[in-house]
Amino acid sequence: MRQTTMLAAAAGALLLAGCASDGDAGAGDGMEPSDGAMEATATADAMTDHESSDEAMAEDSAGSDDAGDESMAAEPDPDNAFAFTGATLDGGEFDGLSIDDTDVILWFWAPWCPTCYAEAGEFIEALPQMPEGVEVVGVAGMSDDLDYMQEFVDNSGVTGMTHIVDLDGEIWKRFDVAAQATVLVIDDSGDAYTLGGGATATDLVEYAEKIAAT
């Protein structure tokens, strides 16, 4: 607003100059405005419009800033392990936040892992017994071969659940998983239980019932 103040002062100076000219010309001439006074009035009017425009721009800017703040507030927390997106083995896309704040079992497997292959049979047996509201999701990693991963699912028969493809290991890192055949059981409050390799169908169902009850 420093520029606006300086221009307003200049307009005032022009107005004073116009008044002084009127006085020198005599009382009769003073009935008509001088060119200087008309110019000063036009300048003052222009400045009023300019200030109104500045205020409108400031309000628009404030509105944009508020919208930007709301957009930033809507961004997921980078420290949230579920704040990820990934492709699924069937060609879809999975949003990790869709299972945030829910009861979920995450199975981290690799296609070359014999223990994982054995666990697949346990998951097949356990899936029909899962309590309502408990999600079961596989996270395939430790390989960059999609065909190999699909072959694992087809041959083991564990087709009744979603499998996320984690080629770069980023999702495994988010959940601090370093080894295949790891099962994480997480309730809707964030409490987690880790089942090592060789989890049975009984283990899976019992832990699922435990988190569903909390």
Image (cartoon, rainbow, N blue to C red):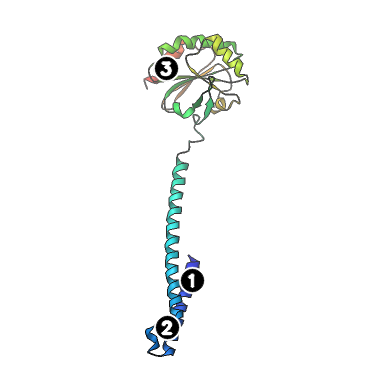
Residue at image position (48%, 38%) is 75
In what quadrant of the picture does the C terminus appear? top left
Q: Which residue is mark 1?
A: 7
Marks 3/2: CA–CA distance:
90 Å
| Sooner in the amino-acid sequence: mark 3 or mark 1 | 1
| Pair 3/1: label in front | 1
Query: In this orientation, which residue lies closer to the viewer: 113 or 46?
Result: 46
Is residue 200 something one can see in this rendering?
A: no
| Pair 3/2: label in front | 2
The secondary structure type at the circle numbered 3 is helix
Q: Position of residue 61 (x, y in %)?
A: 46, 53
Q: Which residue is mark 2?
A: 19
Residue 118, picture quadrant = top right
Task: Tell me the amino acid under the disc marked 2.
Answer: Cys
Q: Which residue is mark 3?
A: 208
Q: Position of residue 184 (x, y in %)?
A: 49, 20
